[in-house]
Image (tube, helix red, strand yellow):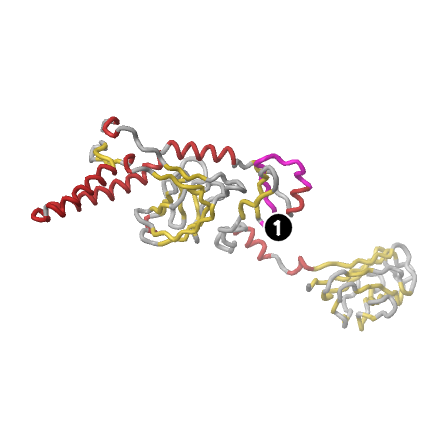
């Protein structure tokens, strides 16, 4: 169709936001029905905060788009606001959330209908104008009602076809592409190493540059420096499931299985008393405080040098104030003569450990040649 048939083309009307504190992107939440494997958003979405569809995952973040979309996936064209889905999702309704950057309105004079040879036949404006004329003629030509009605229905079909084709034509719009590139330059993300807490951003990056982006580990929030302050822009993991034995999520499934296989021994701590060289009978002036609530699982002892003349007997005591001491065993630890380890026949009566309990040992009987006594109290943390 010759260009001069339309005189001067009407301009596009573009409503565009800057994404700044004074002109921020608008939060949008839409409930849309999938038709022809697609939905069309009311506005052009922001590619950096991403489009989120409840219960599904986005693909094609960067690079060449994948040719196959899985049933639980979707792909977004951030230049046009068109979202594609798997064929199995046809006619279903989805919840879509995103930040709207604005929209582009096309005049009817710049929307065209093509024939089967992809030739431009007429514009939407021509179709609308002809429809108006034909509607007026209906009032005059009542005798020819049937013919005019058929022509009107055909015209309306062409209007719907032209509108549908205009949606797809926006994908190739150079104006939308240029604006998207400009938005990328003004909102670029320069990723820096993550920190554990928000306060560490201020200490680790005292002189940030515009675009620097840092993720906080304990909250999952990513912050971007806009030139004046650190602005939260994303919450990592919001759409990711928790890991289980069959599914990767916030943790790799193999790591999850390994973590589940860890036994309670990881909660056990050992209080160790070492008495070097030749010990004396009586209370040993070595005290140990345990900083957790727990339960005694075992008490054992050994010596580095044995004695051939007499057994060695050891008592273990605990206290809250270092004044009143209580024995833990009714049958004390006994290391037989000529043995390096205790006989394992002790009887522990007092198993409970209160946070900050204090322990000490008392040698009730010692062989004359005994040297280097080591005693271990194994405690399982219960809180």
Verify whether residue 208 appears in magenta.
Answer: yes
Q: Quadrant of residue 328?
A: bottom right
Left or right of residue 108: residue 222: right
Give the quadrant of residue 106: top left
Q: Residues within 10 Å of mark 1 (few under 14, many from 20)?
A: few
| Front-most of residues 336 and 138 | 138
Q: Residue at x 88, y 56 (%)?
A: 371
Left or right of residue 376, residue 134 in this image? left
Q: Secondary structure at mark 1?
A: loop
| Secondary structure mostly taken by the magenta-highlighted segment of the chain | loop
Give the position of the N terminus as an image quadrant. Answer: top left
Query: Is residue 137 magenta-colored?
Result: no
Assign the C terminus to one quadrant of the image.
bottom right
> Taking the image as drawn, is residue 376 in sight?
yes
Residue furthest front in the image: 140
Q: Quadrant of residue 155?
A: top left
Task: In the rendered view, tell whether residue 66 sits above or below residue 265.
Answer: above
Q: In the image, which residues are magenta?
A: 203-219
> Viewer-proximal residue, 101 or 141?
141
| Nearer-the-camera pick, 337 or 1 | 1
Q: Judge whether residue 311 can be spotted in this image.
A: no
Q: Is residue 330 above or below residue 168?
A: below
Percent coordinates x, y for residue 112 in the rendering: 26, 35
**Depth order, front residue of 223/379:** 223
**Residue wearing tag 1:** 218
Task: Please name the residue shown 65% across and 61% down the image.
Answer: 264
Residue 373 is situated, as x and y percent measured from the top left of the image, at 84, 58
x then y, percent, for residue 330: 80, 73
Say left or right for 144 vs 98.
left
Q: Residue at x 67, y 38 (%)?
A: 206
Identify the residue at image location x=39%, y=32%.
175
């Amino acid at each position: 169709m010759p260009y001069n048939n339309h005189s001067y083309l009407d301009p596009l009307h573009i409503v565009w936001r800057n994404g700044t504190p004074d002109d921020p992107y608008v939060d949008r939440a839409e409930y849309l029905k999938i038709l022809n494997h697609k939905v069309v958003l009311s506005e052009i979405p922001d590619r950096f905060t991403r489009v989120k569809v409840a219960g599904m995952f986005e693909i094609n973040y960067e690079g060449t788009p994948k040719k196959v979309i899985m049933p639980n996936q979707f792909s977004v064209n951030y230049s046009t606001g068109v979202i594609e889905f798997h064929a199995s999702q046809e006619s279903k309704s989805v919840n879509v959330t995103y930040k709207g950057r604005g929209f582009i309105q096309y005049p009817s004079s710049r929307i065209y209908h093509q024939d089967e040879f992809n030739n431009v036949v007429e514009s939407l404006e021509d179709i609308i104008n002809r429809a108006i004329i034909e509607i007026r003629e209906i009032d005059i030509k009542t005798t020819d009602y049937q013919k005019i009605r058929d022509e009107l229905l055909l015209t309306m079909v062409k209007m719907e076809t032209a509108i549908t084709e205009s949606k797809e034509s926006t994908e190739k719009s150079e104006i939308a592409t240029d604006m998207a590139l400009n938005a990328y330059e003004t909102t670029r993300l320069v990723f820096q190493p993550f920190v554990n807490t928000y306060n560490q951003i201020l200490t680790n990056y005292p002189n940030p540059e515009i675009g620097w982006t840092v993720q906080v580990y304990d909250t999952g929030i990513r912050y971007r420096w806009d030139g004046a302050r650190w602005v939260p822009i994303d919450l990592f993991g919001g759409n990711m499931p928790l890991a289980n034995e069959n599914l990767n999520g916030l943790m790799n499934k193999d790591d999850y299985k390994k973590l589940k296989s860890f036994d309670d021994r990881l909660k056990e701590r050992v209080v160790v008393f070492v008495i070097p060289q030749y010990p004396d009978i009586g209370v040993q002036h070595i005290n140990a405080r345990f900083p957790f609530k727990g339960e005694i699982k075992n008490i054992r002892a050994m010596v580095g040098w044995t004695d051939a003349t007499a057994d060695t007997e050891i008592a273990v005591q605990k206290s809250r104030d270092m004044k009143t001491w209580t024995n833990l065993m009714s049958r004390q630890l006994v290391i037989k003569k000529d043995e390096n380890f205790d006989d394992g026949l002790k009887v522990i009566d007092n198993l409970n450990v209160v946070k900050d309990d204090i322990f000490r040992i008392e040698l009730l009987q010692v062989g004359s040649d005994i040297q280097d006594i080591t005693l271990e109290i194994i405690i399982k943390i219960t809180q």
